[in-house]
Image (spheres, coloured by chain):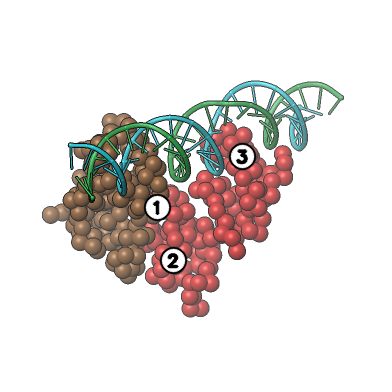
Chain colours: A brown, B red, C cyan, D green
Amino acid sequence: MTKIEVTENEAKHLKFIYRQQYEESRRVKTTSLAKFFGVRPASVTEVLRNLSRKKLVIHHRYRGVELTPKGIKITQKLLRKHRILEVLLANFLGHDKEKACQEASRLDYHVSEELVNSICRAYGHPRLCPCNKPIFPDPKCEEVR
Amino acid sequence: MTKIEVTENEAKHLKFIYRQQYEESRRVKTTSLAKFFGVRPASVTEVLRNLSRKKLVIHHRYRGVELTPKGIKITQKLLRKHRILEVLLANFLGHDKEKACQEASRLDYHVSEELVNSICRAYGHPRLCPCNKPIFPDPKCEEVR
DNA sequence: CAAAAAATTTAGGTAATCCCTAAATAAAAA
DNA sequence: TTTTTATTTAGGGATTACCTAAATTTTTTG
């Protein structure tokens, strides 16, 4: 039950890996991460080593990276936050999808589950974000089906 | 015109200093910062040294710390973000003042000016936060007087 | 399939940040 | 003026996030 700690940078890597792996069914390679984050491959390898140490990914040397069940769980929590924020930004403030995503990206890591859940309630427990990606439910967020 | 960079921790220090200095008219001493942040005085001294290097505070050795005009400006921007977020959290999500402040504290540093301004617009350019503290205006945020 | 090319990791650094303790120093109180 | 308290300095430690160059593995290609 020990709380898993990830840095903001690690969280960004997890989100990217999740999206590639589950939403684009792509093998996630070091280079694509490096390109996306604008850093050298060696820097990505280091992040992957740390995420491995935390048992959030399995790093197949030279072949790619994959989330563990634990990694999936924490990433879905992050994406839930991200997407609920997108709902708020799009609906309440009229941001377009891109803008909403951009802003949500800088905030998701820092938002508490509590706040996310109150936004979720305020919008009647939406199941999709403005980009039509699923919003993972939180059992602590009472959903009236 | 070089953008001033502060870390999140430095930003927290600036906010605390501002509140003490301007809203409680208290001399801001190392110890009060150390107590508030739960760290040793030496750690505060270090932060103050860095803020001095960035010309955001004047550190009167052994006697206290004071914001420079530049320091005031950037802190007011931070507090603007903080307070606009409080408005959103209190009005839209029904958070009480304490809760709103708590959540705003973790987010203010990360929110873009653009987002803050759209919240500001959505609430008709409020002048006070839920705690009745002033919300500093942003010229880029069209205010209809 | 073997050689060349490309991708990736390892090794070894650097710099910034945040934190600490112990000792020195300055300010405030007695 | 002495004692006490507050603060700073000196000197570390740990973590994070980068990097380059060299070694290694995989992939491509002739």
* CA neighbours of label 3 inside 10 A, class few (<14), some (14 to 19), many (20+): few
Instruction: Pinpoint the chain carrying mark 1.
Output: A
Residue named by callout 1: A38
Do marks 1 and 2 share a subunit?
A: no
Residue B21, visible in the rendered structure? no
Instruction: Pinpoint the chain carrying mark 2.
Output: B
x and y, in percent, of residue B36 in the image = 54, 40
* CA neighbours of label 1 inside 10 A, class few (<14), some (14 to 19), many (20+): few
| Kind of residue at badge 1 | Gly
Earlier sequence position, callout 2 versus callout 3: 3
Locate residue A4: give its quadrant.
top left
Residue A38, visible in the rendered structure? yes
Per the model, the C-alpha gap separating discs 2 and 3 is 32 Å
Residue named by callout 2: B114
Residue at x 21%, y 58% (from the top left corner): A133
| SS assignment at label 1 | loop
